[in-house]
Image (spheres, grey):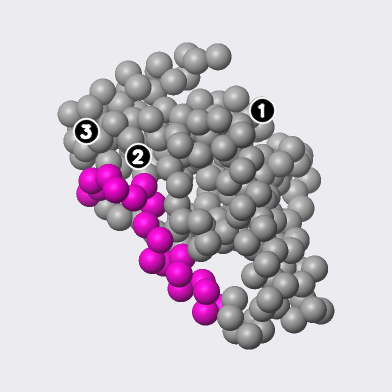
Amino acid sequence: MGIHTYFRSLNDLERIIRTPGKFKFEEHSVSAHSWKVVQYAKTLADIEELNGVPINWKKLYEITSSHDYGEIFIGDIKTPVKHSSLELRSMLQQVEEGMIRHFIEENIPEEFQGIFRRQLREGKDGSLEGLILEVADKMDQVYEAFAELQRGNTEKEFVLMYRHALIKIKNIDLHCVRYFLGHILPDIIEESQISPIDIKGITEEALAQQ
């Protein structure tokens, strides 16, 4: 019982593999994904600050480092499935939030419960930090899918993941998104030239979507 139970539960995130059931050249755990999202978000927030936008760094680190903790209870559900309908997404979120709430009430000392409820909540919202989390999360999908496509993985799942993530990113109005599209994505396209899959074409089609 106590915070020890929470610390022990973090090991479970290392054993949950993203995009289950599909052939992959590289396996990625939820734990590794969360670490990368923190790194992306940190740089994205730096770009915002360089453009004069104030950042709540404490909030940013809390929501990015813990944003997928709930997958301990429900596993990694593929993005196209999770977002196939607003009703399904809402139901999954309710289940995840309910199980997190139950875990906190059963295991976390009362004086820490408010802190854990704040840190383990759904962080993707309309705040600047929530939007940065959304971009960072989708950037990792871009990079995971890109690594597979670049090596010739023809699983349709990775084309959908790459495309969906780019469409989501480009529709978020932030300085860091404009920087990603103008300076980082061109490097991705340049590197994709060695791929047998037309990543450039997939990218251009995704960016053309309204």
Judge depth for marks 1 and 2 and give the one in front.
2
Q: Position of residue 133 (x, y in %)?
A: 61, 46
What amino acid is labelled 1 in the image? Asp
Find the magenta span and give its range. Answer: 7-25
Do the numbered discs 1 and 3 sit on residues whose CB atoms are within 8 Å?
no
Tell me if mark 1 has few (under 14), some (14-19) or many (20+) residues whose alpha carbon lies within 10 angstroms of its own.
few
Q: Earlier in the sequence, mark 1 or mark 2?
A: 2
What amino acid is labelled 2 in the image? Ala
Do the numbered discs 1 and 2 sit on residues whose CB atoms are within 8 Å?
no
**Residue, disc 2:** 145
Q: Position of residue 145 (x, y in %)?
A: 35, 39
- Residue that appears at 22% across and 33% down: 154
Visible in this render: residue 162?
yes
Which secondary structure lies at badge 2? helix
Judge depth for marks 3 and 2 and give the one in front.
3
**Residue, disc 3:** 154
Please, is residue 193 above or below residue 53 in the view? above
Q: Earlier in the sequence, mark 1 or mark 3?
A: 3
Please, is residue 204 above or below residue 180 in the view? above
145 or 46, which is in the foreground?
Answer: 145
- Residue that appears at 70% across and 46% down: 129
